[in-house]
Amino acid sequence: MYPIVEKRVLAPRIKSIKVKAPHVARNVKAGQFVVVRVDERGERIPLTVVDWNRKEGTILLVFQEIGVSTIKLGLLKEGDNILNISGPLGNPTEIKKYGTVICIGGGVGTACIYPVARELKKAGNNVISIVGARSSNLLILEEEIKSVSDEFYITTDDGSRGRKGFVTDQLKDILREGRKVDLVYAVGPAIMMKVVADVTRNYNIKTIVSLNPIMVDGTGMCGACRVIVGGQMKFACVDGPEFDAHEVDFDSLMSRLRTYIQEEKRALELLQTKVKGGE
Ligand SMILES: Cc1cc2nc3c(=O)[nH]c(=O)nc-3n(C[C@H](O)[C@H](O)[C@H](O)COP(=O)(O)OP(=O)(O)OC[C@H]3O[C@@H](n4cnc5c(N)ncnc54)[C@H](O)[C@@H]3O)c2cc1C
Ligand code: FES
């Protein structure tokens, strides 16, 4: 059992929980994730480890409530327990001195760039961060990311904060200035990562994305997380989750993410009926 020691609402439908999970906290590195099972009937869902305290034995998870499992997780209160947390899983980010690195986070993916930006900064890089959301009320971890960035930009789709437009508009502005950029690291919706890859391809800048396919076991056994990278099939949980963005087949990723859309809708309706019925 993994007790929740702190819970915060970061934005509408986006929450953070600090959970006691000493075996993860001891070993986790930036870029890794855990697989969480909320209760005995729960499915296994992957969530990035956003922060950790090795001494306390705690990890921080940030999640968007989009379906049954994330909604069930969001219903838990401080003091409640999560049934299983496996990890840390996946390969850590390669942290070294690249020079100038642009870290891009879209939506809840913003939480996933925080530990990477922080470690890249510690390694001596000049870190430029761009975070984007649909609207200002959906921006998360602004202060945290700002504190580990040399330059920090916000974009919102509706222009309610920062530059009006997408994170890729800000990226294009920076690259058009002719600045030397050694690495771009992006996490967000698949379509956002695809556009980032298209932009940086033109400038020949190494670009890493952290992919979010459906995962089940997270250990390379089930094949659910297969993605096409460089024309080859890879398992995101063990070969990734980070890959060279210029090699990723984003169209197949987006199509596979929609595979269970009807089942997910039905499961959500069932949960809503149960909640209304007070079960
Ligand atoms: C390595 C990795 C790290 C992730 N980190 C985060 C994070 O830090 N915060 C966060 O909010 N989300 C994260 N995600 C996505 C998160 O796992 C899904 O949002 C979650 O599983 C949705 O489950 P659900 O039951 O709430 O929604 P559902 O209604 O079941 O699904 C909604 C959508 O979520 C995706 N999804 C569903 N089940 C899974 C699954 N088992 N694995 C992956 N995607 C799934 C599909 O696109 C689906 O259409 C991560 C995904 C991966 C692969
Ligand atoms: S999640 Fe099962 S092989 Fe990757």
Image (cartoon, grey):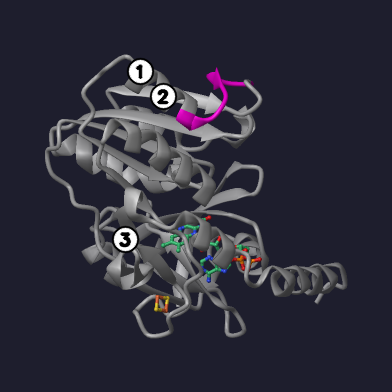
Ligand 2 located in image quadrant: bottom left
Q: Which labelled disc corresponds to residue 31?
A: none
In the rendered image, the quadrant that contains the N terminus is bottom left
Of circles 3 and 1, which is in front? 3
Q: Which labelled disc corresponds to residue 230?
A: 3
User: Whole-Å distance between the Cαs marked 2 and 1?
Assistant: 6 Å
Residue 177 occupies quadrant: top left
Q: Position of residue 180 (x, y in %)?
A: 21, 23
- Crowd rating for badge 2 (residues with CA inside 10 Å; few <14, some 14–19, many 20+): few
Q: Does the magenta segment cover residue 166?
A: yes
Q: Is residue 155 above or below residue 97?
A: above
Span colored in magenta: 160-168
Q: Amino acid at mark 1?
A: Arg
Are the two marked residues, 3 and 1, in contact with CB atoms closer than 8 angstroms? no
Left or right, 84 with respect to 261, comes to left
Q: Disc 3 or 1, which lies upstream in sequence? A: 1
Q: Position of residue 254 (x, y in %)?
A: 55, 58
Nearer to the camera, 250 or 58: 250
In the rendered image, the quadrant that contains the C terminus is bottom right
Are the two marked residues, 2 and 1, in contact with CB atoms closer than 8 angstroms? yes
Left or right, 178 with respect to 42, comes to left
User: Whole-Å distance between the Cαs marked 3 and 1?
Assistant: 28 Å
Reading the image, the residue beneath label 2 is 172
Are the two marked residues, 3 and 2, in contact with CB atoms closer than 8 angstroms? no
Residue 274 occupies quadrant: bottom right
Nearer to the camera, 97 or 59: 97
Q: Which labelled disc corresponds to residue 176?
A: 1
| Residue at figure coordinates x 13%, y 33% from the top left | 124
Q: Is residue 64 above or below residue 123?
A: below
Q: Is residue 253 above or below residue 9?
A: below
| Residue at figure coordinates x 59%, y 79% from the top left | 42
